[in-house]
Amino acid sequence: PYSDWAKRARIMQVYCYHKDQSYENVVSSANRFIEFHPYDKDVPYAYYLIGLSYYDQVLAVGRDQKLTQEALKVFKLITEEYSDSVYALNSKTRYNFLRDHLASKEMEVGRYYLKRSHYTPAINRFRGVIEEFSTTSQVPEALHRLVEAYLSLGLVNEAQTAGAILGYNYRSTDWYERTF
């Protein structure tokens, strides 16, 4: 059971489950491989297949984001713990995409609140995007929506601050044009 052939068969089983889109089996089989062979050269690959299994199941932005969170954890682990592996760069790309995905979800909820004139929860969502997802493509729109929400509440100074940040950091975007 601990021969090189058995080890190879176990990691190939993980791959076959992934090809078959049997995602629950991928996760359990890959975790079993990692448990039995924690220092093997294929451990990053096993983690990568786990991450891909979660990634492939990520649904539309409007759905529950639990799988997105799980994929983020795995891809972050790969980029931090196995940064020299061949899977690190692809994991980082997917990690950044998933962060943008989560920011999109927050923006969707914030726009929902804004449309219904629930300004405080909308502001909280938009500020959350700016603070937690500052490197995503959603930040310019979040700043624009903050200006809208603050002006709707009559908070001119806060709106000017958000507008100034938008103008300073994102002058070349359509959101800047719309705001000013």
Image (cartoon, helix red, strand yellow):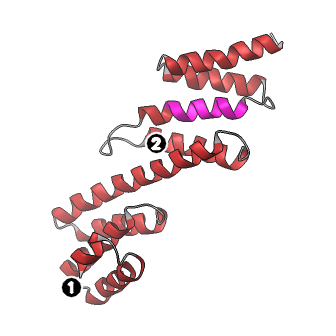
In the drawing, does residue 130 fall left or right of residue 46? Answer: left
Q: Residue at x 58, y 26 (%)?
A: 27
- Number of marks in the image? 2
List the single residue furthest toward the left: 116
For this rendering, which residue is in front, 20 or 160?
Answer: 20
Check if residue 45 falls in the magenta segment: yes
Amino acid type assigned to the residue bearing label 2 in the image: Thr
Q: Which residues are magenta?
A: 43-53
> Badge 2: how crowded within 10 Å, few (<14), some, or many (20+)?
many
- 67 shown above or below 96: above
In the depicted structure, whether residue 119 falls above or below residue 99? below
Label 2 secondary element: helix
Q: For the point 36% across and 85% down, which residue is it?
A: 164
Q: Is residue 68 above or below residue 111?
A: above
Q: Which mark is residue 118?
A: none
Q: Residue furthest front?
A: 172
To which quarter of the image does residue 142 belong?
bottom left
121 with respect to 103 (left or right)? left
Res 91 → quadrant: top right
On the image, numbered disc 2 is attached to which residue?
68
Q: Position of residue 167 (x, y in %)?
A: 35, 82
**Marked residue nearer the N-terminal end (1 or 2):** 2
- Image-based side of 32 in relation to 3, left or right: left
Q: Secondary structure at mark 1?
A: loop
Outermost right residue? 3
> How far across and how far down the image is residue 87, in percent?
64, 39
